[in-house]
Image (tube, helix red, strand yellow):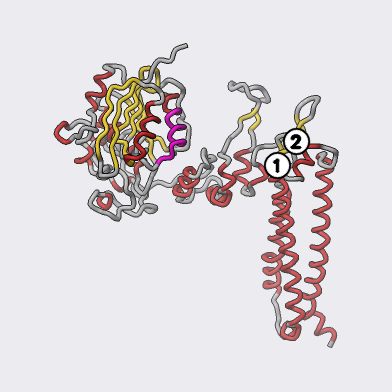
Amino acid sequence: MAKLCHPKLRLARIMGWLQLFLGGLVVIVTISSLVKFYHAGFFFHSEDICRHFYGSKDVFEGFDVKALSDRIEEVLDKMEDLQNKLEANVQKMEKEKDQLEKSNMSRQEFKRYLEDEIVQPLYDAHIALRQIRLPKLGGVGNTTYMEEPLINNFVVEEIRKYITPKENKNGKINIFKTERIHNTIGHACVLMKKELEVYMDYDVGSYCKDDWNIAQKLMLHGCDPLPRRRCLTRASKLYFKPYPVNESLWKIPDGRNVRWNLYKCRDFECLSSNNTNRGYTKCTGCFEMDKEMLKWVNKSTISPVDFLISDVLAVKPGEIRIGIDYSVGTGSFAARMMEQNVTIISTALNLGAPFSEVIALRGLLPLYITPNQRLPFFENTMDIIHTTGLLDGWIDLLLLDFMLFDWDRVLRPGGLLWIDKFFCSRKDLDDYMYMFLQFRYKKHKWVVSPKSKDEVYLSALLEKPPRSL
């Protein structure tokens, strides 16, 4: 009889031994962590460490103590959860002893249980523990602790590989006068850790998930610049070569060249201005080329706040060659300026419609950038900056101030700033006027016109002064 009972109670005994084993493992991990801290110097007298443990300092001489503490706590929590789960299973088996004796668990089922419930959680905790980085000693004389920024905040290996500095292969100083290259991500990425780890969770060398909307969400929330990825971008299933350049400027692109699955509309017909459910609200008619062709050139359709491109270029004849269109649209301003031999880069976000794809398919240059990102251009390089339909009365004055100073940085002396139909409430007009006038630009055009009972339009053409020392 004892021979028959022994196989039935074997699982319960194994679970009991596993419980004891994991309890000991938790103690060992805790002791090893304390030993690592001791060797790292954290138990020597240090005012900075004391201040950290009293909550006044989270970073010790370049080392993120809080991130390290959180990661160790995360590993210990995983192991504690596993121990609690095993204890609950053992108690359940003791209560259901009679049913357990009657049941027969096959070896395959027992193996699967061990792999899923014990081996894999232990492996995850083991890997997470190994990924914790203690500070490296650096410097000569007065030794300091050095750590790769944010390294202990993330678990996904692709993120950790990306943000770890890359040493020069030859061990010498490179052309940028540095010993290593640091790939950066915005610190706001830590606040969106889950979304960033979803974005970076892929198989290296395989196709990327169709997740540009996650990337754009991260960018708009300040996780910018995003890390590079090592996966292949998906294209539309039926990609046809674009139209010739002279034909593409004023012709709607072939819809088969756009991936529509993440948009509310699935074709260009759906994006027409008479469809109120198209998925975006800005830029009425900007996917209808017959309407776009009338902008900035047709005198019969303009209002007092609409300036003609010919009149603007006449202010600086022959001097306007390159510039930026900081707007929401499909690149029609850049197309018109291209006809005047002026190269315009159009900023674009895909706000419910394929703005970036359409700009590129028209043979123009899209710049995928958010309002909170510094323009990637050097100082005093642009001849003109044009903006319409993006910066309206919704924008915070401090954010607008940072943006205008950045525009001033890249605009060359004598360059033109074209504020095109900016609108806001009447009560806020003085505040916004001050923002545009604070740089003491020369006024070439300045028009305020009513938009509605409570709102007004403002259009202006301003010239940056030399400011020579």
- Main SS of the magenta part reads helix
Outermost residue, top side: 469
Badge 1 marks a residue whose secondary structure is loop
* In the image, residue 120 above or below residue 167: below
Where is residue 79, by image quadrant?
bottom right
Q: Which residue is mark 2?
A: 136
Provide the residue span drawn in magenta: 395-405
**Which residue does the image show at 46% across and 23% down from the upper left?**
378
Where is residue 58, by image quadrant?
top right
Residue 423, percent from left and from top: 31, 39
Where is residue 336, by image quadrant?
top left
Q: Amino acid at mark 2?
A: Lys
* In the image, residue 385 above or below residue 399: above
**Which residue does the image show at 51% across and 48% down from the upper left?**
206
Of pointers 1 and 2, the one earlier in the residue sequence = 1
Q: Which residue is mark 1?
A: 58
- Which label lies toward us, 1 or 2? 1
Residue closest to the eye, 388 or 339: 388
* Residue 397 among those drawn in magenta: yes
Badge 2 marks a residue whose secondary structure is strand
Q: Please indicate whether residue 1 sits to the left or right of residue 466 in the image.
A: right
